[in-house]
Image: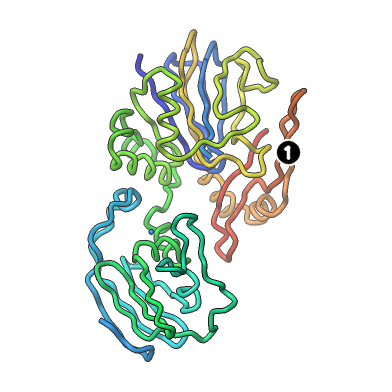
Amino acid sequence: MHLRSLASFPGRLSQSLSVSRKHLTTQSTHARNVQTFTKLHKIKRVQFLTPAQSAHPSSSLSTSTRAKSSSRIEEKARGVPVSVTKFLQHEDHLQLEYKGAKLKLNYVWLRDHCRTGDSFNHQTQQRMVDSALIDPNIQPLNVAIDDGTLNITWPDGHQSEYHLEWLLSNTYEGKQHIQRTLEPLLWDVETLSASPSPSVSYQDYLADDGQLANLLHNLLKYGFAFVEDAPVTVEATLAAAERICQIRETFYGRFWCFTSDLERQDTAYTAESLGAHTDNTYLNEPSGVQVFHKMEHVGEGGDTLLVDGFHAAERLRRDDPEGFDILSSVSVPHHYLEPAVHTTGVGPVLEVEPGATKDLKLIRFFR
C-alpha cells in the first residue's frame, strides 16, 4: 500500500483533508501551518509530537584557509561553499569573518564559553567557568586560526579552542547569517506548484544523512515535507519521528492512533470538517514538529489542502500593520477540555521573535 508521511515545521501550514480523493496525505505543525480537516470516513492515523597567524591585541589582520568541509547535516543542506576566514582584533572583541558571516566575539564571552580543558565538563555538557571571576577587561595574549579552529591564549596561560562551525552556530551574528541562508519560502499555489516536491523516500531518509538534511531543509523552506513509501506500521512511524529528534510526551501519550470514533472529545475524532487551524494551541509550548501517518482509509475523502500561515501573516503585516501588532501583542487563552483533562495555553496568535525586526516565530490559531 503506497503511503505518504508528512512532518511539518512550527505552525506554518494550513491543512485540509477533503472528500475528493481516496488517497490521504497528512501533515501538521504549530507555527507555520494552519490545518483544516473536511469530511473524512474511517481514517486511522498515528501521530507523534517531536517536540557547532598570530597577532597581539592591537589591531591586526590575519587570514586562514577555512577548515575542511564539515559533516554536519545542516551544512549538507545549505551546500556552503569554501571560504576564507579573516579576523581583526579590537580592544574588547575579536571580529571574525567566516563563510560570509561577520562575527563580533567579545573577549569575556569567548573566555566564558571556552570548552577546552577544565573550563567545560564534557560529560555533563556544562560550563565550569565562574563568569563573575572573569576580568571584564580581559584580552588574549595570542590569537591564531588553524584547520578550522580559533586558538586563543589567555593571560593566565589557559589555551582555548573554538571550532569555527561552533562559533557560527552559537553567536548572534552567526545565527542571523544561517537564517538568511535558510530563508523560508512564502508560498501560494503558483509558487508551490513551480517548486520541486518536498519529499524523500522512507528508506533513503532512514539510511542517508544527506536525505535527512534534504527533509530538514524542506521543513525550513516550506514548513512541511513528505516521506514517501513508509511501511504501514506504528514502528515505521516511530522510526521516522525519532530520525529527527526525541518525541515529547503529552497527555495523549508518547504517540497515539485515532479515527472518526469520538473516542476523545475532539472534532479530530469525527468525520466533520475543521476550518484552518494550528494544533496544540492549548499547550504553552506547542509542538515544533508533528508527524502524521495514514494507516488505513475506507471510503471517500482525503485530499490535503495546505496554506502557508507565514505568508498570510506577512501579508497582514504589510496590509494592516495595526492588526498585525494587535495579534502579535495580545495574549489569548486556548484550552482543551474533556472529563479527565483540562489544559490551557496562553500566547498571542502571532508570536514574534524579540528585537526590532519582529520576525515571525509561530502561529496559534484555532477557530
Q: Position of residue 59 (x, y in %)?
A: 36, 89
Residue 365 lies left or right of residue 122; in this view the side is right
Q: Which residue is drawn at 57% across and 18% down?
A: 258
Rendered location of residue 204, percent (x, y): 28, 32
Q: Is residue 50 above or below residue 87?
A: above
Nearer-the-camera pick, 69 or 34: 69
Front position in the image: 104 or 353: 104
What x and y, as percent, mark residue 20? 47, 16
Does residue 257 appear to the left or right of 224 in the view shown? right
Q: Residue 21: x and y, percent?
A: 44, 16
Q: Which of 48 and 196 is in front in this view?
A: 48
The N terminus lies in which quarter of the figure?
top left
Q: Which residue is drawn at 55% across and 43% down?
A: 31
* Circle 1 Cα neighbour tier, 10 Å, few/some/many (<14 / 14–19 / ≥20): some
Picture residue at 58% right of the left edge, 64% below the top: 355
| Tag 1: amino acid | Thr
**In the picture provided, is 333 more to the left or to the right than 232?**
right
Towards the viewer: 192 or 329 = 329
In this rendering, the answer to whether 30 lies above or below 326 is above
Give the residue furthest to the top: 299
Q: Mark 1 points at which residue?
A: 344
How many tags in the picture?
Answer: 1
